[in-house]
Image: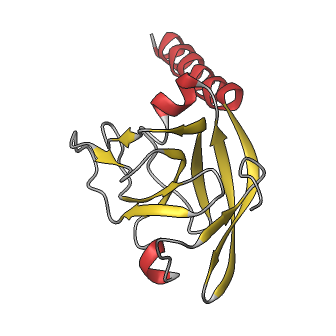
Amino acid sequence: MKRHTQRLVAALFMIFVGFDAAATEPGNLEIVTSSGAHRFIVEVATSEEARARGLMFRRELGRKAGMLFDYSYEQPVSMWMKNTFIPLDMLFIANDGRIINIAQRTVPHSLRPISATRPARAVLEVVAGTAERLNIKVGDRIRHGIFSAR
């Protein structure tokens, strides 16, 4: 029985790892604030499946890590914290990389919708407290290849 359980756990792990590896792509990102540029390594969720899963079920996220949800074009965007164990800051971003609005210290497992104040191209999720720690404000810019340089 023990061997069967080990194989099942290994198979489930591979499914989850494979899902993440196939659905997200790593990338570098900078948040440009009045205090300078702050570099992050992010997973970019470009598929519907990757955006739906997001950071669910993860137990930790580094201070310089995050997930960038790319919706390809500006549209109404709402997020939630279902099955998310890590409190997050969510930065809603326009086509040109400007931050539209920020939801700070979101509540793990909450089903309450967290929405952009206007259509957004993307959402950057980082560990809670990052916006306050780096003094990130609405109007600051995100530098990443998905955003047009204006």
Q: Is residue 68 above or below residue 135?
A: above
Q: Nearer the viewer, residue 25 or 96?
A: 96
Residue name at image x 70 percent, y 31 percent: 21
- Farthest front residue? 150
Residue at x 41%, y 38% (from the top left corner): 76
Q: Position of residue 6 (x, y in %)?
A: 53, 20
Q: Residue at x 62, y 89 (%)?
A: 35
Q: Is residue 48 above or below residue 148?
A: above
Q: Is residue 98 left or right of residue 28?
A: left
Report the residue that reaches farthest toward the bottom.
Answer: 35
Vertical position of residue 52 compared to residue 69: above or below: above
Residue 114 picture location, percent across and down = 30, 48
Instruction: Specify the quadrant that holds the C terminus.
Output: bottom right
Please provide percent x and percent y for residue 28: 76, 58
Residue 14: name its quadrant: top right
Please name the colour scheme applied to the rendered image.
secondary structure
Residue closer to the observer: 92 or 54? 92
Locate the N terminus and report the quarter of the image it occupies.
top left
Residue 134 percent coordinates (x, y)? 53, 81
State whether residue 102 is above or below residue 1: below
Q: Quadrant of residue 57?
A: top left
- Number of residue marks: 0
The one of 109 and 125 positioned closer to us in this rendering: 125
